[in-house]
Image (cartoon, rainbow, N blue to C red):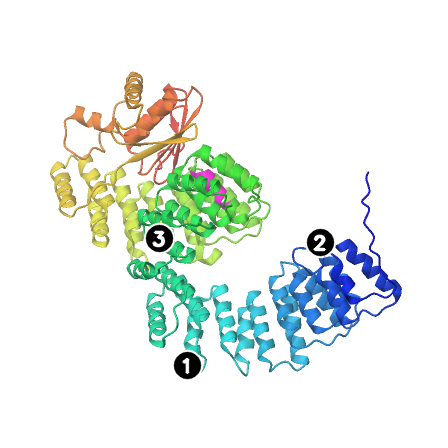
Amino acid sequence: METLTLNPISIPPIIPSHLLSSATTIPQLKQIHARILRSGLDLTPSLLSRLLSLPLNPAAAPSLDYALSVLLRTPHPPSRLRCRAFRLLGPRRAIAAYARLRQDGVDFDRFDFPPLLRAAARAGEGEGGEAVVRETHGFVLKTGFVADPFVLTALVRGYAARGCVSDARAVFDRMPERDVVAWGVMLDGWCQSGCYSDALQLFEEMKSSDVAPDQVILATVLSACGRTGNLSSGKAIHSYILESGIAMDAHLQSSLINMYSNCGSMDIARKLFDEIPVKDLVASTAMVFGYAKIGEIETARAIFDEMPEKDLVCWSAMISGYSESDKPGEALKLFNEMQASGVRPDKITMLSVISACAHLGAIDQAKWIHVFIDKNMFHDVLMVRNALIDMYSKCGNLASAWRVFEGTPQKNVITWTSMITGLAMHGDGTSALALFERMKAEGVEPNGVTLVGLLYACSHTGLVAEGRQVFESMVHEYKVEPKLEHYGCMVDLLCRAKLLREAFELIESMPFHPNVIIWGSLLGGCRVHMDVELGEIAAKRILELDPDHDGAYVLLSNIYAKANKWDEVGRVRRLMKSRGVSKEKGCSWIEINGNVHEFLMGDESHPKSKEIYGKLEEIIQELVLVGYSPDTGSVLVDLEEEEKKEAVLLHSEKLALSFGLINSTRGSCIRIAKNLRVCEDCHSFMEFVSKVFDIEIVLRDRTRFHHYKNGVCSCKGFW
């Protein structure tokens, strides 16, 4: 092995100070240091300063341990060098240096504490950051700095940064003098800890004091208003800025835009945004986020496209906007563009991407996202793993969801809940209940969401007794008060089990007013089990709460149509038309070779439309031979029977299935997602196809998954 030979530096017997400044590398500096030690010279403050200047350069990280050793071997190092070391050594080394210097009896002054406390604030878990803050607090009390606002402000910042915001407030309240910096640190501490209401209350106290807030403090408080959606307080602060004549710098303008955007007041946000001559990144991102939040996704995209520079926050805001606006395909497409631009995603971005993939239900995309997560080292992030469980469950691949779950070493309540909910949506209530018992055995306390998932599992598997037991044990065993969601699951469970009157009585006994979803569950049960009288009551209650609820009109029409009450069907349809309510169109999509294909009812827009309809006709002919007959009960118009059959045979999921069969082989699996609940005829159709064509079909509708295999569906009629 070739050895590295250093060019020796000629060092005279007496070492002048300027020689240290001539060293340009750590090895050279170590040579000089060694000669200093051998010569017996004292390390004067000036020599020590020169010695530490190169190792403490943040760009020379490998030399920090050397710098620490030099510092600790220097008797009573001067304050300015201690402060510099605390700032540049990094949290772990700074804390070690402080402990050793305290042990050596070094006298600290007021300038030591701020850099030390900043280092403690940045310390990671297990590095003793909080302990140093508390120990420093005790030291400050003992050494007479208790009235020094410079030191006390540093303590407030240290406590707040460690999340000990109550301790920070206690120090703040005891300060004899509080300048604008101290107020700003305390306000920022409340906000960083998510205590936005406390921040707003503290700001009111500040206005009553003789200290005027500056632009930084006003920006902090505006952020608190935006986070809490407190538009009235935000407007009051805006008025205060204008009335006080405070200079409106770019940061404060962006903060106002961000506040109004977060509060959904986009008209004012847009006015302020248009007044800015040069749109900065923060203001533009706030506008993108605000428009996306209220569903004006195209306006958000227009602003996004006009931005000359885009950072990670901006890309993430736009991706999240698409994901939450039911445009998952656009979210994934934009994610690919972000990667091409060289911007690396963080865990927040990945959560939006995973959510988009889950919504799309595309398993190939899901697998690609999982590979990306592993390659980019996000697989150890618990919230990402929890999202992956949800994604795989919603993409119909319960086995992959289970593998992620079992491979998660430290599971929290969300991990368990995600897996329980995944089993529930796939109709495996027995496994969901078993997993719940395992969760309790491992000492994880369920929360309200866990119990919703468990009740959902019982509902979609017909486990009435088990559902009742879970519901009854919520308060006394798990200390969870039932909310609307829990009552909704119980109503759904009873309706699916044909216990409609019991479901109605449960609704009437609720301690709060039922919402549209609960009445909708009852109405859906009435449609399935043909209870016209109770269905009319449920529909009336829904329309009282939401006159534009298209589902109520449709379900009530279904009930009347099944009962051959065509006059009533017509009356409901006329009422819909007069109120401008239209039925949500059914849409299905299927992924083939990584590409997602979308179909509407009677859709002829697909490039292979002719081939798809030819395949559908072939399928129908095959199924008729084995006993299939179209169920026309879901047709909402009084047509001739043949016309009804033609209408029901053009549903979007049948077109998606036909396209899937063109591109698959016997024994494979076809995965389809639909935005609405699958109708009775399509459900029966899928069962027949799975047997006749020897193929597995996984269909995700609005409420659950259906796994069709050998002519049988996993739902067993509870859907």
The reply to whether residue 111 is visible in this rendering is yes
171 or 636, which lies in front? 171
Along the viewing direction, whichever of 301 and 668 lies nearer the viewer:
301
The residue segment tinted magenta is: 386-394
Q: Quadrant of residue 232?
A: bottom left
Q: Amino acid at mark 3?
A: Lys
Earlier residue among tags 3 and 1: 1
| Element assignment for label 3 | helix
Eye-nearest disc, 2 or 3:
2
Residue that carries the numbered disc 2 in the rendered image: 62
- Label 1 or label 2, whichever comes before in sequence order: 2
Label 3 close to label 1 by CB (< 8 Å)? no
Who's the residue at 47% across and 40% down the image? 340
* Label 3 neighbour load within 10 Å: few <14, some 14-19, many 20+: many
- Whether residue 462 is visible to the viewer of this picture, yes or no, is no
Q: Nearer the viewer, residue 546 or 503?
A: 546
Q: Which residue is mark 3?
A: 293
Give the labeled residue for mark 1.
208
Measuring from the top left, give residue 437's x and y in whole percent: 52, 46
Residue at point 20%, 33% (across, down): 635
Dot 2 amino acid type:
Pro
Which image quadrant for residue 609?
top left
- The answer for how far apart the CA atoms under marks 3 and 1 are is 35 Å
Q: CA distance from mark 1 to mark 2?
A: 51 Å
Q: Mark 1–mark 2 contact, CB under 8 Å?
A: no
What is the distance, in whole Å, between disc 2 and disc 3 at their CAs? 46 Å
